[in-house]
Image (spheres, helix red, strand yellow):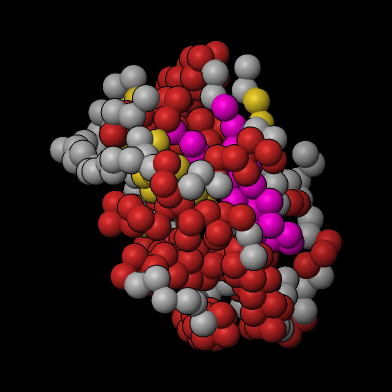
Amino acid sequence: MKRLLNQSELSTMIAKPIADQQATMQLTFPTYPFTPILGWSISRFELFDKCKRQYYYTYYSKYVKDVPSYKMSQLREMTSIPLETGNVVHDVLEAFLKRLQKSDRDIDEERFIGYARDLVKRYFSEKTFIEQYYLYDEHFSLERVYGKVETCLRNFMNSPSYNWIFMAALHDRGNWIIEPTGYGETRLDDLKVYCKMDFLLPVDNCVYILDWKTGKRDEVKHSRQLIGYSAAANALFDIPWNRIFPRIVYLYPGFDEMEIAVSDDDRERFFGQIKDETEAMYAFCSDVEKNVPLQIDAFPMSPSPSLCRQCRYRELCFPQWRQDDAQKKEGPDVQNIPFPQE
Ligand code: SF4
């Protein structure tokens, strides 16, 4: 049975003194020859489950016929304020950890926060946001974004995880894996799977995997993600399951952590789910090996106000809400968007 670790177990784990630590572990990612077949990931299946049409637009945009390719690229590249905020925090923590790998001089917190503000300014000036494109929040304030990013970073700097990185994990920093490139491809039960980790670090003969979150806690989804990280680390590096400690690190609004002990039943259930979910996605391919989808009509829309509001492709499903000058002048009542009956 899956069990959340309590705070004292977590503290014991994170406070292990350097003196107790022994040999280091070299971690190297295997490479796989390219195959076009689709690969399971939590986010891919989540999208498939929520709205098949959005899934089609996201993963099979080159097959969309009646929309110009520049428009598909424009929509696909849009981001959202929460996504981009998380992106900044991830990139600042990546820079922080890489700097720590080279030098253990004290961090100048104010410079660190200043760097984060510069990154916010840059990222938010370069991208198109769903909230602005669909006129939900044309005048959003960068100050709100600065505030959230700063809170996340200060929560991190005052956290037990931060202390642990300095006390227990720093001695083996040469072997840290920080935001590895690629999509985290691996194989589980011979299936192609993607499991991208934020920060992986060996301590003694164990491996810790940290995943930063700037959004809400979701125990069910995040527990599954942690089991996925354990499975991937086991498959990629041949590390026994009982030496893998994956942890979600929540940075907003306050600091929190979630770590689980993965049982044999959890593992079996997880592998069964991956198989079933992969097969469900295969069923929407006309050629599984080449990953060619069925016709778009086989991917129904599943409209709901909350889902469509966050969807990049909304103007394709609801052309009346396309952003154009006329609409802008009239100022659409975005709170009362007509959706088909659910
Ligand atoms: S707008 Fe709604 S129905 Fe259309 S693809 Fe997006 S989520 Fe699905």
Which quarter of the figure has residue 41?
top left
Q: Nearer the viewer, residue 315 or 24?
A: 24
User: Residue 57, can we see it?
Assistant: no
Q: Nearer the viewer, residue 84 or 37?
A: 84
Is 85 rendered above or below residue 125?
A: above
Q: Which percent across, then down, holds residue 68?
A: 40, 63
What is the span of residues highlighted in magenta in the rendered image?
Answer: 244-261
Residue in the image at 48% along x and 71% along y: 92
Apparent side of residue 160 relative to residue 298 in the rendered image (left or right): right
Q: Which percent across, then down, holds residue 325?
A: 64, 83
Is 277 rendered above or below residue 151?
A: above
Residue in the image at 79% along x and 55% along y: 338
Apparent side of residue 216 relative to residue 79 in the rendered image (left or right): right
Q: Which percent across, then down, holds residue 125?
A: 51, 84
Magenta: main secondary structure equals: strand
Query: How many numbered markers are drawn?
Result: 0
User: Residue 153, can we see it?
Assistant: yes
Which quarter of the figure has residue 236?
top left
Apparent side of residue 312 relative to residue 293 in the rendered image (left or right): right
Is 70 rendered above or below residue 307?
A: below
Inspect the magenta stretch and tell me whether residue 155 lies in it: no
Apparent side of residue 170 relative to residue 80 in the rendered image (left or right): left
Q: Quadrant of the N terminus?
A: top right
Q: Quadrant of the C terminus?
A: top right
Q: Which percent across, then down, holds residue 48?
A: 53, 37
Inspect the magenta stretch and tell me whether residue 252 lies in it: yes
Q: Nearer the viewer, residue 220 or 207?
A: 207
Residue in the image at 63% along x and 59% along y: 159
For the view shown, which residue lies furthest in the front direction?
A: 19
Residue in the image at 69% along x and 84% along y: 143
